[in-house]
Image (cartoon, grey):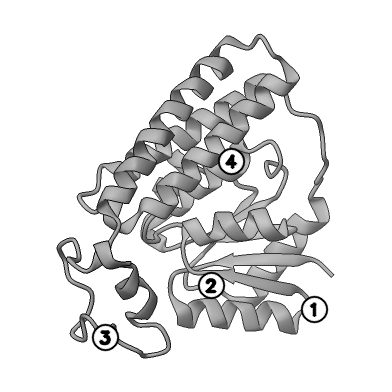
């Protein structure tokens, strides 16, 4: 049974698509945004990714670039879900990387036929990647970090994503050096990432909000006893007691 990862930020559309695919005999896993999608791909390695374009945090085009740049996932087929007004953007930015696309509002028969056709033609193979491929993937992750850091809430809202991207890029450069120990770019960027990651972790510690609030606020409907009205916007004064 083939597994399809459905990536769609609209819960109603995500559930509707998932139901249609399950009724057609496919195994389905879900993700509500690009960041979660990359995590699910890493954990589950699906047979196909059905990917919306407009999503929070990271759009579908960027997710597709990361999937296709990663030597371990580049052979996973991608099918885009795109609104009528997004067709031109799809062709100009990502159609060369994806295997197919389906327009919204989708027709169930067309969607299923497209997915089954792509799965039938898929050639998922585990080939040995070059040092250059791993280096390029690491550099793409670094460029993704810049997107997050351009936000005013970079370290209060996206700190976990930024650190994970640093870890992913570092692992990619290590893979490149394992294949070619003398690879100059991989060695240069690995050393750069190691230094920046250390600085970033220190920065994260300084900006880390109250652990009491992090644990209680919104979890199981329980508000923080220290801040019953919700997590404060500024650095929590009670943080030093945690």
Task: State how far apart marks 3 and 2 are (Cα).
Answer: 47 Å
For the residue labelled by badge 1, is the local secondary structure a helix, a strand or a loop?
loop
Mark 2 or mark 4, which is nearer to you?
A: 4
Q: Residues within 10 Å of mark 1 (few under 14, many from 20)?
A: few
Mark 4 or mark 3, which is nearer to you?
A: 3
Q: Quadrant of residue 129?
A: top right
Q: Quadrant of residue 96?
A: top right
Which of these two is toward me, 112 or 154? 154
Residue, disc 2 = 106
**Residue most extreme to the bottom:** 221
Residue 209: x and y, percent? 27, 62
For the residue labelled by badge 4, is the local secondary structure a helix, a strand or a loop?
loop
Residue, disc 1 = 25
Mark 3 or mark 2, which is nearer to you?
A: 3
Q: Residue at x 26, y 49 (%)?
A: 206
Label whose residue precedes the other's in the sequence (4 or 3): 4
Residue, disc 3 = 225
For the residue labelled by badge 3, is the local secondary structure a helix, a strand or a loop?
loop
Label whose residue precedes the other's in the sequence (1 or 4): 1
Label whose residue precedes the other's in the sequence (2 or 4): 4
Task: State how far apart marks 2 and 1 are (Cα).
Answer: 19 Å
Which of these two is toward me, 86 or 220? 220
Residue 75: x and y, percent? 72, 43
Residue, disc 4 = 97
Label whose residue precedes the other's in the sequence (1 or 3): 1
Label whose residue precedes the other's in the sequence (2 or 1): 1
Label whose residue precedes the other's in the sequence (3 or 2): 2
């Amino acid at each position: 049974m083939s597994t399809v990862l459905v990536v769609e930020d609209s819960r109603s559309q995500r559930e509707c698509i998932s139901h249609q695919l399950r009724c057609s005999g496919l195994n389905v896993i879900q993700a509500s945004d690009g960041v979660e999608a990359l995590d699910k791909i890493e954990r589950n390695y699906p047979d196909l990714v059905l990917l919306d374009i407009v999503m929070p945090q990271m759009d579908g085009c960027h997710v597709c670039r990361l999937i296709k740049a990663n030597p371990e996932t580049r052979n996973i087929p991608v099918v885009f879900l795109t609104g009528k007004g997004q067709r031109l953007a799809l062709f100009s930015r990502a159609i060369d990387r994806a295997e197919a696309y389906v327009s919204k509002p989708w027709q169930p028969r067309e969607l299923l036929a497209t997915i089954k056709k792509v799965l039938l033609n898929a050639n998922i193979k585990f080939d040995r990647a070059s040092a250059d491929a791993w280096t390029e993937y690491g550099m793409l992750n670094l460029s993704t970090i810049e997107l997050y850091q351009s936000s005013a809430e970079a370290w209060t809202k996206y700190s976990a994503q930024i650190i994970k991207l640093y870890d992913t890029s570092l692992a990619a450069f290590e893979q490149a050096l394992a294949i070619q120990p003398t690879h100059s770019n991989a060695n240069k960027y690995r050393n750069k990432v190691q230094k920046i990651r250390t600085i970033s972790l220190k920065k994260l510690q300084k900006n880390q909000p109250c652990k009491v609030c992090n644990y209680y606020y919104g979890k199981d409907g329980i508000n923080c006893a220290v801040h019953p009205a919700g997590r404060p916007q500024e650095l929590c004064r009670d943080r030093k007691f945690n």
